[in-house]
Image (spheres, rainbow, N blue to C red):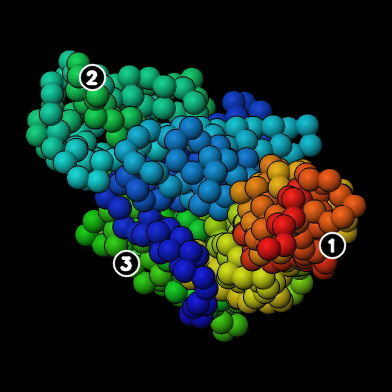
Amino acid sequence: MRRIAIALTLVVAALGLKACAADAPSAPRPQPGGGTGALQIQLVANDANPKAGTCTLVEAIVTLNGNPVPDGTGVNFSSDFGTFSQSGLPLVTVSTQNGAAVTALCGPGAGTAKVKATATVGANTGSATLTIIFQSATGTGPFVASCSPSFGPKEGGTTLTLNGGRFFGTPSTTRVQFTVNGVTKDGIVQSVSANQVVVQTPGFPEFQSPQLLTAITLTMGTNQAQPAVLSLPNCFTYGNAEAGTPAIASILPASGTNEGGTRVTIVGGGFASSGVQVFFGTVEATVVSVSFNQIVVLTPVATPSNGNLNETVDVTVRNISSGVVSNAVSFTYTEPILITSWTNNIQPLRGPFAPVTIFGRGFQAPVAVSLAGIAAFVQSVSATEIVVLPALPIPQGCADISGTINVVNINTGSGGTGGTFTYKIEKPIITSLSVSSGTTGDTVTITGTNLPLLTQDADVKFGTQSALVDSSSPTQVVAHVPAPSQPAPGCDATNPVGTLQTVATVDVTVTDRSTTCSATLTQAFQMQLPCVAPTPAP
């Protein structure tokens, strides 16, 4: 697989997100949303209980009347804790591809994030929410390793055992909540031990679907100031299937390059720990790890002979021990990243910046983008188009900053380079002075273009003497005439004592400290001092 070397900031971002996509003991919490409307959103995370300081991938699966929404549909993600990797902000917009939009939420510390996704197609709007709980990095809290059984009737009454460790409390201080299609009900906690929580499932007979994805929230220590809370995996599904039947809720990512080797997390339940086989179309994938609710695989290579080159194929999971097969999702093979064109590739170094649109193919959210080696803020991603906003660079001197446009698909590590982006330094120009002569302390307004934006960045000199600056803007700098280095002149025969006389004609120079760029108006100002009585001849 092709790997592209990019700026350090992008490498760090990519590594952080690769880490968050790795095998985690915890798993996703899908929550269908949007009520009963035509547009439905289901949110899935590859780890709903990531460690503090890491990231977790979040996918929104968007359907309209049961079918995937058109590619390029914008999904607005927001969170009340942490920031999204593409924007560095608590909100981001990502375009759908094959009905799915993927982002990554990064938590600065331990805390609970309420993620919301909203999408609109025509007159139809839908939304969904997802709880992600960033756990303390110490690893001393409770955890869930498996659930038994993985299926039960929607009428409820199933005895469900949550297996794990570091559990504490009693049934009266433990709460287990089940959420289906936005409706939350409490289970009846029957027993709590150090390694098991046993709960009787509530019923959801009001829903007609034969299979209901279930999100579970486990809260321990409800009598404490800070209870321990876990967003449990998709460990239990309401349905009529046998306990050993695999069920696929989603895959992250849902596309990858023909080169194969894309790391894919299959989210669901009922996966046999004794072993599974995963097929992409008819070709078997390499299984990296298996837990009760997720499988991590590496995709096989796509070739014409396999019939999967640039094609969408079914993903099949087979429990080897029982021979039971699940086939519910698809994966799209794409060409490697190719950047073909771009817009707004020359912009002023100090902004304001216009969005840059990168055209090509093989783009897969989430992506990392750099412009001239500087990480950009990703605003939206589709298979053929990326929109980013340039970031403010730190200039190293009075010169333009130029370099290539780089895109990396974070999930796969594949990348592409194309075109040149330039942060252009607009050098300052002085056009006039409000006065052409003056004495120490007088105010002079310097007019021009591209002058320092901030007062603290404006360095003004009259000759070699630094002036006090009152204010600065791109068109005007207001400064005070400094004391000249020359002594007070003797009065000539026509001037009384105290008359201002010129002691030097000097250049006026304005330097922008942020760029080190300077502008000079040559021999433009007469430095003056009050004359003194001439010394009598001996």
Residue identifier under label 3 = 288
Position of residue 160 measured from the top left corner of the image (x, y, whole percent): 24, 32
Residue 449 figure quarter: bottom right
Q: Earlier in the sequence, mark 1 or mark 3?
A: 3
- Visible in this render: residue 189? no
Position of residue 19 measured from the top left corner of the image (x, y, whole percent): 36, 59
Which amino acid type corresponds to the residue marked 2 in the rendered image?
Ala
Residue 386 figure quarter: bottom right
Classify 473 as above or below 35.
Answer: below
Q: What number is the disc on residue 524?
A: 1
Outermost residue toward the left? 194
Classed neighbour count for the residue bearing mark 2: other residues with Cα under 10 Å, few (<14), some (14–19), many (≥20)? few
Q: At 59% from the left edge and 26% from the top edge, which residue is drawn?
A: 35
Residue 406 figure quarter: bottom right
Q: CA distance from mark 2 to mark 3?
A: 40 Å
Q: Nearer the viewer, mark 1 or mark 2?
A: 1
Assign a secondary structure to mark 2: loop
Q: Earlier in the sequence, mark 1 or mark 2?
A: 2
In the foreground, 45 or 180: 45
Q: Nearer the viewer, mark 2 or mark 3?
A: 2
Verify CB contact (< 8 Å) between mark 1 and mark 3: no
Quadrant of the frame with the C terminus: bottom right
Outermost residue toward the bottom? 305
In the foreground, 36 or 26: 26
